[in-house]
Image (cartoon, rainbow, N blue to C red):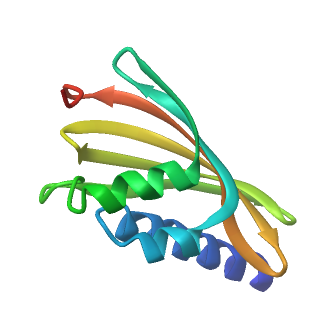
Amino acid sequence: MESHLKDLEEVRAVIQLYIDGSNGDVAKLRQAFHPDARMMGHIGPVDTYIPITDFFAMVERQPGMAGPNYKACVRTIDLAGDAGVAVLVETDYMGCDFVDYFSVARIGGRWQITNKTYAHTGGAPPS
């Protein structure tokens, strides 16, 4: 039980790296994601299926794009062995609300995000 609680804390810390990094700190994003991770979802009519490094580049080009009213809350973390899923609810990221589903895996003894799939749940997409 103690090791499971430690795993939950470590995954929560990885998701916090995403939260802290998504508004401009690409170094934190690089810590959170496996280098081969992908990002999938849509904003309005635009579908996204990109390597996570494209997201890093976007954040780097537009630091602060999440905006001053951005908030995020970890809704759930479900782990089994070295794999799991974390669900993050975001409000006012680029004026939109999202639910993010992060696949996580313990690789080389360290938890990392291996995939981000997101749903646009509200707000007007940026033009």
- 121 over 102 or under it: above or below: above
| Residue at left offset 25%, top offset 36% | 96
Q: Is residue 44 left or right of residue 10?
A: left
Q: Is residue 29 left or right of residue 20?
A: right
Q: Is residue 122 visible?
A: yes
- Please tell me which residue lies in front, 41 or 10: 41
- Occupied quadrant, residue 61: bottom left
Quadrant of the drawing holding the N terminus: bottom right
| Residue at left offset 37%, top offset 38% | 98
Quadrant of the drawing holding the C terminus: top left
| Residue at left offset 35%, top offset 57% | 59
Q: Is residue 19 left or right of residue 12?
A: left
Q: Where does residue 14 sit, x and y in percent of width and height?
A: 56, 71
Q: Is residue 74 visible?
A: no
- 56 over 40 or under it: above or below: below
Residue furthest to the top in view is 45
Q: Where does residue 104 sit, x and y in percent of width and height?
A: 70, 58
Q: Where does residue 5 sit, x and y in percent of width and height?
A: 69, 78
- 116 over 83 or under it: above or below: above
| Residue at left offset 38%, top offset 57% | 73
